[in-house]
Image (spheres, grey):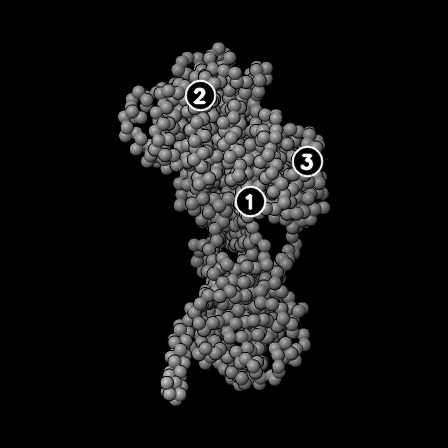
Amino acid sequence: MHPPRLVAVLLCVAAAAAAASHAASGGASVALRVNNDRLYRFSYSTEVLLDRAQGSKQGSTNFRISSGVDISLVWRNPNNEDEQLLRIEMSDVTIENAVPRSSGKNIFEGSSTEGILGKQKLATLQRPFVVSWKSGKVRSLFAYKTDPPIIKNLKRGLASMLMVQMKSGKMLEADVSGKCHVEYKAAKGQVTRTKIMDSCKTSETSFTTHSTVLGVSEKSTSVTTITLQDSFIKSATSEEVHTLALNARYTASAKVTSRQTLKLRTTEAGPREVAGKDAAGVVKSVDPKLISVGLMAEKVKPQCKGCPSLSELWKRLRKDLEPDRLSTATAPRAFLTLIQGLRKANKAEIVNVLKGCSKTALPQLVDAVTSTQTTASLEAILEFLDFTKKDELVLQERFLYACGFASHPSESMLQALLNILKGKIANNDIKESVVIIMGALVQKLCERGSCDLPAVVQAKKLILEGPRNMKDEAEVQMYLLALKNALLPEAIPLLTEFAESEVGAYSNIAITALPRYDMELITDEVKRTLNRIYHQNRRVYEKNVRVAAADVIFSTNPSFMEVKNLLLSIGHLPHEMNKYMLSKVQDILRFEMPVSKTVRQVMKDMISHNYNRFAKAGSSSAYAGFMAQTVDVTSTYSLDILYSGSGIMRRSNMNIYGQSNGAFLHGLQVALEAQGLETLIAATADEGEEDLESYAGMSALLFNIQLRPVTFFKGYSDLMSKIFSMSGDPISVVKGLILLTDHSQVIQLQSGLKASAEFQGGLAIDISGGMEISLWYRESKTSINSRGALVVTGNVTVDMDFASMGMEVSFETEAGLDFITTVQFSEYPFLVCIQMEKATFPFREKLAKFEKLPQGKTFASRRGKSALVAGSEFPLHQENSNMCKRVHGESGW
C-alpha cells in the first residue's frame, strides 16, 4: 500500500477506536481534571436516620451536618496530568435535625455549631486538607496527625464523594467504608457508583449467632450518582441503607439510612497551581504538618460518661437474677444488661463480683460471665471455679452449658475444656458434661471454618477415639454423645458401627445422631445398616432401637423398596411396635412429610396396605403438628410414645422445631426412657428385652445441643427405694440463662460516621421431668415441665462524641409448656392419656428512640403494645382424646 494511503487508513482506524471509547464512556471526556486558577464552591450535607425497617422518615431519629466546601487545584503532575493534588476546605458548618422538629423535640435549637462541637473541633473540621486525585480516584488523604479520629473520618467521608470512573466496569476500591468491590455504570454526563456491600472489608470486629433461625439478617445498599460538567464533578448524591432484622421476628428490625449530597454552587478565580516534582514534596511545602492518614476509617473509641462500674451495675441488677425471678422477663432483661457491662470489664473486676456474690444468685452470674465470651471473662470464670470440689457441681455444670450455648466460641474456650479434662474432676457427671459440650464447641468452630485450629484438632482426635478406647459403658456413651454434638463427617462410619452394638444405649445414641447430618452424608452403607437393625437381619434388637432406625430411614429419602419393606413388617412386630409403626405411617401422610409421596405409592399395593395390617390396636403413637405459623417462622412439634407389651412406657420423645428463611433449628427434645420394669406388675418382657436392667431416665437436647442425660433410677434396688420414697417432685434437667441471639457489628458509613448495631436475646429456662409409679393404684405418670421467659433487644446507635442518637426495638414473653402422660395398667388393654398444654402468656413489644447532646439536651420517645396469648392444649389423634376421657372422666376432660 502507498505510504500516504497507509497513514490515512491508520488515522481512520485510530479515529474509529477513539469514537468507540468515547461512546463506551457515555460520550464524556476521558480526562477528569480540575482547572488551574479556579475555585469550585460546593454545598455539602450528610445526614443519618434511624428507624425500624418499616418506619418513615418523619418518625426517625436523625441529624444532618451541612457546610460549604471549597475545592481548588494545588498541583498537577507535569509527567501525568491525570494525577492532581486538591485542596479541600469546609466552612459554615451547621448541625441540625434532618427532619424539622418542634421546639420541644429539637435538641439542636438554641445551640451553635461551636457550642455543639467545641471551638477546637470546629476549627479542626474547617481546617483545609489535601487529597491525591488521580483519574477520578482519591488515592490518599493528607491531614494533621493530631486531628481527632471522628474529624478525620468526616473528611474521609467528604473525599469519598470525589470517587468517579469514566468507564463502566467493576473494580476493588478503598475509601472510608473499607475495601469494597464497586461497579460503575457510565452514561452521558452521569456516572453511577454501586458498592457491593457484602464484599467490604474493614478493621472493625463483628460476630453473630451460630444459629440462622435465632440470628439476624442484614441487607445493605450503597449507590452514588455523579453528574459531570467541564471535566469535573457538578453534583454527587449518595444513599446508603442498612437493614437488620431478627429472622424469627422481622418487626424486630432497624434501618440505618445515610445520605450525602455535594452540589456545585459557583466557580470563581482561585489560587494558582504550586510548582513541584512530586506530590509528597508539594504537600510538605503547603503545610509541613500534613501527613498521609489513609483512606479507610479509623476506629473511634466509644466514650461512656457517667456509666456505672461493673460492681455498681451488679448491685443494681443482682435482685433481678435471684431464682424466684427466673420465670419472669425481669431475669433475661437483667442478664442482657449485665453481659454488656461484663464485656467492658477486666478480669480483676469480674473475679471480685464473682467472689462477692450471694449463693442464690451465683449460678445466674456464672451464666452471664460465661456467655460474655471475652478473654477477661473466660480467664475470670476459670480462676473462680474449682473442678476438684464436689460441692460446686451446679456452678460447674452451668459454666459448661453456657459454653455449649456460646454464640461465637473461641479456640480458648475449647482449650479450657481440654485442660479441665486433663486435670482432676471431682464429679463424674461434670466429666461427662465436659466431653459432651466439647463436641458442641467442635461443631461450632468447624462450621465457622476453624476446624484446623490446634485445640479443635486435639478435641476431634479425643472424641473420635474415645468410643473404642473406653471400656466403661458410661464413658462410651459420653463420647458417643460428644460425637452426636460434633457432627463430624468422619464420625459417620464410627456411628454406623456402634448403631449395630449389642448394648442398646450405644445403638440408640448412634442412630439418633445420624439424622442430624446433612442428608447427602447418609450413604447407602448407612442405610443398609439401619435396615438390618430394623428388620433384625443379624440379631435381635430392643424395640426402641428398631423404631429409632425406622425413624431415620423415613427421614433420609428412602427408596420405594425400603418403604415397602417397612410397611410389610407391620403385623409381624411386637404388639405395641405394630401400633407405633402404623401411627408413624399415618402421621407421615397426614403431615405431608417429604416421604409421604413414596408411602402413597407403596400403599397402592393391597399386600402392603390392607385392613389386617392397618387395623392393629395398641397405645403407642406418633403425632406431629403446628405450634405456630407466622410470616417469619414456622414452629412444629412431635410426640412419639412407645410402650412395652406390658403397658409400661418404653420411650417418650417430645420435639419442638423452628424453621425460618430456609434454616432449621431443633429447639427442644426431651426423651424419657424406661426399661426392665415388668417385674413390678408381674408381666412378661418383650423379645430381646428379657434381661434388661431396671432403668428410667431423661435426656434433653436444647437448641441443637445435646445435654448430659439424667438418671431417675438404675437397678432393681434403686428402683424399689425410689418407688417407696418417690415424692412426685420433678428433677431438673436444665435450668439457667441462655444467650440465644448475639449479633454485634459496626456499620462504617460512607459519610465517615459509624453506626453500632447489637441484637441480643436472653432466655431464662427451667426444664424438669418426673416419673411416679403407684403399685396400689396400678398407675404411672410421667411429666415434662418447661418454663421460660424470653427478652430480645435490638440497639442501633450513632455516637459522634459531640452528639449521639439511637433506637431500641424489643419484645418479651413468659411462657410454659407441660407434657403429661398418664398410664393406667389395672386392666388390659391399658389406658393411656397424653396431654400437651401451653398456659396463657403475655407478649410485649417496645420501641424507644433518643437524641442527645453532651450538654444534657435530650429527646426521647417510647411506645409499645402488649397482648395476652390464650393458652391451649395441642391436638393429638382422636384415639388419645377418647382414652383421656376414660382416664380423667367425661367431666374432667
How far separated are the C-alphas under marks 3 and 2? 42 Å
Measure how far apart labels 3 and 1 are at the Cα level.
Answer: 23 Å
In which quadrant of the rendered view does residue 721 lie? top right
User: What residue is drawn where x is 44% and y is 39%?
Assistant: 519
**Amino acid under disc 3:** Lys
Dot 1 lies on which element? helix
Q: Which residue is mark 3?
A: 422
Mark 1: which amino acid? Cys
Residue to which mark 2 is pinned = 643
* Horizontal relation, residue 593 to residue 517: left or right: left
- Asked if the residue at tag 2 contacts the one at tag 3, i.e. Cβ–Cβ closer than 8 Å, the answer is no
| Secondary structure at numbered mark 3 | helix
Check disc 3: other Cα within 10 Å, few if <14, some if 14-19, many if 20+. Answer: few
Vertical placement of 322 versus 693: above or below? below
In the rendered image, residue 513, in percent from the top left (x then y), is placed at: 50, 34
User: Residue 131: where, in percent of width, then height?
Assistant: 58, 74
* Circle nearer the N terminus (3, 1): 3
Question: Where is mark 1, residue-wise?
Answer: 446
